[in-house]
Image (tube, coloured by chain):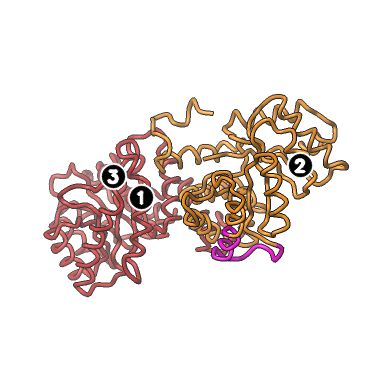
Chain colours: A red, B orange
């Protein structure tokens, strides 16, 4: 699976502090550590407590690209901050994210074209997050149709079924799994699927256990990518084992060793 | 899910010795310990190294039913040994198992009727274990048709997709998941699905990790029951978490505590 490391996010106190203090070394080490543990891309989010978001995003992206050319997923709801991040990426970036609302969708598709970026499309709109798989799929189809209508590559589109915390919206957890399965039937070839994994365990007591159990179920449902914490060793072990059991990587006795 | 404890099996050395020495206490404690850890039924298998299999099975079942009336899954390939076990069960037993071969199927369906027992039907025949989901489903359909043709309850039939060790038949692991999903479409209501879980990790280095990862994927695919080791704590935690995330049991903060 395609692992997008979640740790460079201003919602974490250590990262927030590093952004404030312009502590390059902390950010760069966090980037490299995530890559070492298996991240195929890094999410970049400045958080909410920043005075000048545009220059914070610029600084973050420049700081990371000094030490790695890995794919960056620029994670912000603000258009100007998004463009500030995309501008300094050294590899093809991912835009994280759009909803299914036309204004937002138009703006972010325009940015995707300008910067040759992938796009994460959330199955939600200004009416909120639907409670069932079918309504999520309608929104996914809307995003997909707009994306393909612009002649963009299906392979660059990631549909995110929007998982909510299990302690808030438990009934939606299987609905999101069903969404992942059904997205794979929307087109041929289908768009990719992605999840913001850690959200499922927000506010719960057994976060790591809930995260890895849900991820394994999502992988069995066809998930392609997830934004997650690659520093969670049990999570990475579960991913590597699921990949073996889905016959996506070849089994060898010590498949957990000697891997990134 | 319906957990069938696998530990009372003569293939384990400690159990084999207990059978030989007629050590009632060992067997009874192993029965109660599995139930305490979450087993809803117990598999009973005398193993292969027994001189008088009929009286060994009788002794085992009598020994267990002295301390519990839980469902027993009588696990043997020999018809006389099967009947020896079924005869002494105090609750409705499960016959483990038949293949899709007509002679075997006829014999075991006759026993199921005589003893009002459930039946585990393996998707294999005298031609072997098919390599893909479709061929497994054909065999499942054959067993199902015979079962329903006798007017037996669909709820008492368990289809086992026959998982092989991942280091032997890796490509079949996702095929068995697909089999589980498709069995649920064979009839309305569908038969139950079951797996002999530990087989998937036979001969591998990370047995518990492989077992629990595969089980979580199977649960996401609709699995109802499994023969497994309830003394594996990480496995039970994964099951309880998967049940929460599939919205089958209600979430509470300490859902792992105070449970069997």
Q: Subunit of mark 3?
A: A
State the image quarter where residue A15 is shown.
Answer: top left
Residue drawn at 49 percent across, 58 percent down: B182
Q: Is residue B135 magenta?
A: yes
Instruction: Specify whether disc 3 shares its chain with disc 1.
Output: yes
Residue A61 in view (yes/no): no
Residue B233 in view (yes/no): yes
Element under label 1?
helix
- Residue under label 3, please give it: A15
Q: Residue A30 — which label?
A: 1
Q: Residue B83 — which label?
A: 2
Q: Nearer the viewer, mark 2 or mark 1?
A: 2
Pointer 3 with pointer 1, Cβ within 8 A:
yes
Tell which of B204 and A230 is nearer to you: B204
State the image quarter where residue B10 is shown.
Answer: top right
Residue drawn at 19 percent across, 70 percent down: A113
Element under label 2?
helix
Pointer 2 with pointer 3, Cβ within 8 A:
no
Q: CA distance from mark 2 to mark 3?
A: 66 Å
Q: CA distance from mark 2 to mark 1?
A: 63 Å
Residue drawn at 25 percent across, 64 percent down: A89
Q: Subunit of mark 2?
A: B
Q: Is residue A138 magenta?
A: no
């Amino acid at each position: 699976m395609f692992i997008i490391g979640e740790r460079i996010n201003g919602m974490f106190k250590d990262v927030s502090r590093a952004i404030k203090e312009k502590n390059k070394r902390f950010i760069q080490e966090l980037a490299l550590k995530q890559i070492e543990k298996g991240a195929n891309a890094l999410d970049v989010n400045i958080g909410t407590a920043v005075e000048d978001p545009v220059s914070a995003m610029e600084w973050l992206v420049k700081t990371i690209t000094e030490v790695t050319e890995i794919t960056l997923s620029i994670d912000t709801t603000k258009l100007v901050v998004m463009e500030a991040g995309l501008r300094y990426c050294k590899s093809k970036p991912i835009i994280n994210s759009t909803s299914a609302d036309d204004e937002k969708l138009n703006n972010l598709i325009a940015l995707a074209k300008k910067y040759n970026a992938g796009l994460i499309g959330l199955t939600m709109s200004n009416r909120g997050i639907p409670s069932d798989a079918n309504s999520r799929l309608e929104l996914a189809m809307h995003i997909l149709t707009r994306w393909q209508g612009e002649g963009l590559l299906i392979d660059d589109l990631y549909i995110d079924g929007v998982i909510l915390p299990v302690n808030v919206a438990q009934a939606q957890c299987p609905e999101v799994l069903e969404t992942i399965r059904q997205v794979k039937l929307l087109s041929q070839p289908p768009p990719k699927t992605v999840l913001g994994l850690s959200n499922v365990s927000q506010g719960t007591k057994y976060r790591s256990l809930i995260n890895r159990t849900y991820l394994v179920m999502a992988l069995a449902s066809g998930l392609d990518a997830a934004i997650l914490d690659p520093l969670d060793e049990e999570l990475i072990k579960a991913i590597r084992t699921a990949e073996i059991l889905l016959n996506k990587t070849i089994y060898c006795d010590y498949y957990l060793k000697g891997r990134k």
